[in-house]
Amino acid sequence: MSSSDIFIGETIGTALLTLLGGGVCAAVTLKSSKARNAGWLAITFGWGFAVLIAAYVSAPLSGAHLNPAVTVGLAIKNSDWSDVPVYFAGQLLGAMIGAVLMWITYYGQFRVHLSDPEHIRDATLGPEDPHPHDQAGPVLGVFSTGPEIRNVVQNLTTEIIGTFVLVLAILTQGLQDNGKGLGVIGVLITSFVVVGIGLSLGGPTGYAINPVRDLGPRIVHALLPLPNKGGSDWGYSWIPVVGPLVGAALAGGLYNLAFA
């Protein structure tokens, strides 16, 4: 795979991933959406199908990492870091593009939701708050993850564990067999692994398990002209970046120790 193939494949694939994954969050969250209040099952399966579609599309070009944690895990497994920067660049760009496309798709719903008096009140911070950009706004959860209980150790550990499960499952099934990318069964298995992680481990933090899935849309949230959107919770933003990378490194290390 050439660097251009990797960059294009990861950009397209991660854009589809965040468009469809963010799209199910918007569908369940926003007012005037037909799927509003569909619940956690809809979100977990929506993200699983997002992985399925994005991986099928991008696998022929880049192997469908779609996630810096997967890239790190494979780099540790294969002892090859040469293409890691290209993967990271395509993944972050794709995540931002996908978030913008999701916003365009739900543009009217965002307007209705954020003009509701209840949400205007929630997004309006008092003058005593010295860090308004560290506060989660009323629609940030459509773009990025956030904890139900804000505890740095627990939140970080949860992301480490969830990503460890994801990356170990990918490495042990041979996701990138001989550099040819995902096989048909591999794509399906990985998609169900993501659903399983969401159902079993997603409750505490919303299971980012992917640094760019969280960081790219969070940047877009901060930049978009959304009235009454509130802050982007930058105080929490490092956890869904660092946690998945640590989890991936641990999974790669265990794979080399136990399976290689």
Image (tube, rainbow, N blue to C red):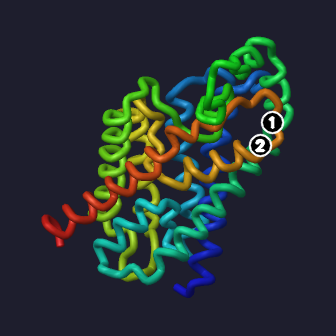
Q: Which mark is residue 35?
A: none
**Looking at the image, residue 33 lies above or below residue 52:** above
Q: Considering only vertical position in the picture, is 42 above or below 61?
A: above
Question: Circle 2 is placed at which residue position?
Answer: 103
Report if residue 25 is visible in the image: no
Mark 1 residue element: loop
**Callout 2: 10 Å neighbours few (<14), some, many (20+)?**
many
| Residue 253 location, quadrant | bottom left
Against 238, residue 236 (above or below) is above
Q: Are marks 1 and 2 in contact (CB under 8 Å)?
A: yes
Q: CA distance from mark 1 to mark 2?
A: 10 Å
Q: Residue at x 43, y 67 (%)?
A: 71
- Residue 49 or residue 127, whichever sits in front: 127
In the image, what residue occupies the spot 43% across and 46% down? Answer: 194
Residue 197 placement (x, y as % from top left): 38, 41
Quadrant where the C terminus sits is bottom left
**Residue 147 higher or lower than 182, as above or below:** above
Q: Nearer the viewer, residue 12 or 239?
A: 239
User: What residue is disc 1 on?
Assistant: 226
Structural crowding at the residue carrying mark 1, measured as other residues with C-alpha within 10 Å and reported as few (<14), some (14–19) or many (≥20) = some
Q: Amino acid at mark 1?
A: Leu
Could you tell me how many numbered marks the image carries? 2
What residue sits 54% from the left and 43% below the top?
Answer: 47
Q: Please give the name of the residue rendered at 60% of the width and 61% of the height, measured from the top-left corner.
A: 92
Residue type, mark 2 in image: Trp
Residue farthest to the left, as pictured: 258
Say whether residue 213 is visible. Answer: yes
